Amino acid sequence: MDTAPGWSEPAGVRVRVSAAADLYRRREALVLRHVAGENDRDLEAIMATFAHPRYEIVPTAMVYDGDAAVRQMILTQWEQLPRMHYVAEQVFHSADGLIVETRTTCPGTPVDMLSINLFGFDGDGLILERCYFDRMLFAAELEKVNARND
């Protein structure tokens, strides 16, 4: 590996980005674009992040597989739930994907909860978002919103 003029490598040390580290960076950037699309309620931006769209909502045992099913699930969620905002608090990489600790809030409300989202990949392609959250906590948080609106 060539070095920039004026820079030298210590003897025996090669500065190089591993293929795995590069793949992890690309995957993380894709997931962050996905989350931004969810925050912006930009359905096309969300769908563009998938090589194959699939959501698994673990607490409800619901699976949405394929373009039409995922689009309908997202649109239904936007109709039925208050506007939510997601922040990737922590990101953990593995050989087959990312695990993201996600903070979910509803702007202007006291809603604030953590969940875990597993993003599965086939190479660079996002093929799964699997959501884990406390269903009872989520219901209690939504009650806070409903109480404010009454």
Image (spheres, rainbow, N blue to C red):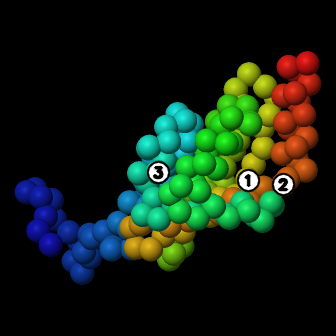
Image height check: is 56 above or below 133?
Answer: below
Foreground mark, 3 or 2, reads 3
Label 2–label 1 contact, CB within 8 A: yes
Q: Residues within 10 Å of mark 3 (few under 14, many from 20)?
A: some
Q: Residue 52, percent across and down?
A: 47, 65
Residue 43 seen in render: yes
Whether residues under marks 1 and 3 lie with C-beta atoms below 8 angstroms apart, the answer is: no
Judged from the image, the secondary structure of the residue bearing numbered disc 3 is helix
Quadrant for the C terminus in the image: top right
Residue depicted at x 84% and y 36%: 142
Residue 52 falls left or right of residue 3: right
The residue at which mark 2 appears reads as 134
- Kind of element beneath mark 1: strand
Cα distance between the residues tagged 2 and 1: 8 Å
Q: Residue at x 53, y 63 (%)?
A: 66
Residue under label 3, please give it: 47
Residue occupying image coordinates x 61% and y 41% = 75
Q: Amino acid at mark 3?
A: Met
Query: In the picture, residue 129 is in which quadrant?
Result: bottom right
Q: CA distance from mark 3 to mark 2?
A: 26 Å
Q: Which residue is mark 1?
A: 115
